[in-house]
Image (tube, coloured by chain):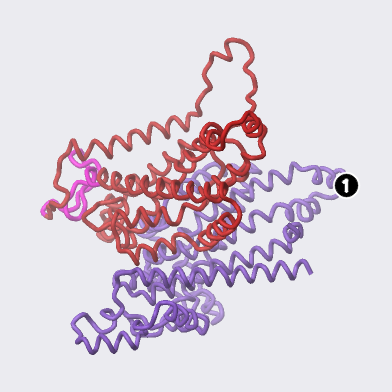
Chain colours: A purple, B red
Amino acid sequence: MVRLRFLGFRLLSLAGLLLVLSLVLFLLQEISDADPVAATIGGNASPEAIAAARERLGLDRPPVERYLAYLGGLVTGDMGTSFRTHRDVTTDIATYLPATVELVLFAFVVALVLGVLFAVSSLLRWPLAGPFRGLLFVGSTAPTFLLGLVGLVVFYQLLGWLPASGRGGVTDGPTGMTLLDSLLAGDLAAAGDALQHLALPALALAVGPALAIGRVLRSSLTETLGSDFVRTATSKGLTEPQVLVRHVLRNSVNAALSMSALQLGFMFGGVLLVEGVFTWGGLGSYLAASLPVSDFPAIAGVTFVLGALYVTVNTVADVLQSVADPRIRVS
Amino acid sequence: MRSDPYAPARPAIRPRPVGVITAARPRALPAGRVVAAAGLVVLVLYALLVPVLVPVDLDRVDYATGPTPPSLAHPFGTDLAGRDLLVRGAHGLRVSLVAALAGATGAVVLGCLVGAACALVGGRLDRWGMRVVDGVNAVPHLLLGIVVAAALRGSLLTIVLVVAATHWTQTARLVRAELLALGTRDFYRAAVSLGLTRRQVLRHHAAPRLAAQLAVALGLLVPHAVWHESTLTFLGLGLPPHQPSLGALLDLGQQALLSGAWWTLAAPAGLLVAVTLCLAGCLAGRTEDHHG
């Protein structure tokens, strides 16, 4: 019962946040000086054509009515027509989303691995732990796109190990994610190619989140290892793996889990920059092309989709966390 | 993200120094912090002095020189248009620091106002105010910044507004928590029972404590704001091209990279990383981990 109520409350606040997001996007569109009429039919149109276009775009109606129409469109998956590509924004986003999701998910895995390494290396005092932590720390102070650029200089220009741009692999597969499609097609060479293209952008995207996750995990691991119940568990004769898995891990993973979710959300923002550097051909590139021409339906659409992903990821993490730690539901 | 918003800036009770010698000896500063502070001073001096000492027209181009690698005449090299990167870097650092300082200050002031209003008025305003804070926090601020900048078009003011509008929530929470916690403390009750007015309590007891915390919050925000400026400008949403901020220089550097002129990227990138590291290093030890 408590669990259901918690779930209901989280879902309700998720819906509320999406509503607020849509309102913010609508308001920004209102105060923006970009003229949608000029963008659709050009600046030199006759007054009649302008009036017709205003009516077609619904600009002659009051703002509240327009917001409700916009909201209704969002609910039914209609985000308007892009001024630039003259296609439905929903169609455009569906085309570019898989590339972005693939990059973010791959980078997230990299971030998790690096983060765990960071946490464990500071506890176990491995020989190369110091330089590794220093490198991660310096890397995390630089903006994401700068990391990408430095990665390009080192691994593409100087060493020539990795490609500079594009995606590689099987490009016309069913999921739109090159690595997954290559693996599904059983084409290992293509999968390797896709992996090579993924490596640099994913690393650039992963360094900052990895440090954040690693730090949280390290501090909670240190705390848990020093707690009384771990001493009790050890002294009542449990083996080390038993203590680690049953007592230490479950009690340490919680903070790291919520931090991971937060970082996964941030990555949906950071990916825009990384895509710009590596001409990745996902939502970031789509947004970058839409920004200079003030293609607001596209900008708002991409922002809404990425924002919705961010909010959803955090909600799912909250629910997962309550499963891992029942105390959260009660408070 | 501070682990405990109620924790005082310094431990309330310091261990008493033993003997005269230990008491007289000043507390040793960590070496890293000294280096960071010195580095920051050097960077600020560089940003302030170089444009004055080397009066070069920023818009003058010299394609005959073209990109030259770092040399004695041009320690940071020259960019594709033959402009000296030492001078342009100084200008860029200056613009970026001004934008970041203004943005961070705006965020702290706004957060302070909202937080204080929520804590002091309480009731419905507090509830709704905190909902708004949650709402703003729930949207990734880089994304929000991009849309705001896209709607308002790039200028120094836009960057300042974007940074302020997306970063005030942490300060608001901090101030609110601090003020609410104040009410439970003994010295507050003592002050009230002595007959001090609310204004006097706020001025003599709340303000000094808050000032220390706000200084740290501001210090943490500035490097983050530098980061935002360069990011937005890099995306083409920030400052116009004739104002060479670090982000604009990085953007040009990326274009020059294909022709092998790595130094056009190295100069602004090095400056950016250096200024962020120095700012963060100065505050190290004063704060817990900061994410965002």
Image coords of residue A258 (percent x, y): 63, 58
Q: What residue is shown at x 78% (from left), y 52% (from top)?
A: A247
Residue closest to the eye, A2 or A244? A2
Magenta extent: B64-88
Quadrant containing the N terminus of chain A in the rendered view? bottom right
* Left or right side of A42 for B291: right
Q: Is residue A171 visible?
A: no
Residue closest to the eye, A142 or A11? A11
Q: Which residue is mark 1?
A: A237
Q: What residue is shown at x 33% (from left), y 34% (from top)?
A: B42
Image coords of residue A66 (percent x, y): 42, 80
Question: Is residue A59 covered in magenta?
Answer: no
Which secondary structure lies at badge 1? Answer: loop
Q: Amino acid at mark 1?
A: Gly
Near mark 1 (Cα within 10 A), the count class, few <14, some 14-19 or many ≥20, is few
Image coords of residue A150 (percent x, y): 38, 54
Quadrant containing the C terminus of chain A in the rendered view? bottom right
Residue B21: name its quadrant.
top right
Image coords of residue B226 (percent x, y): 38, 49
Q: Main secondary structure of the magenta part?
A: loop
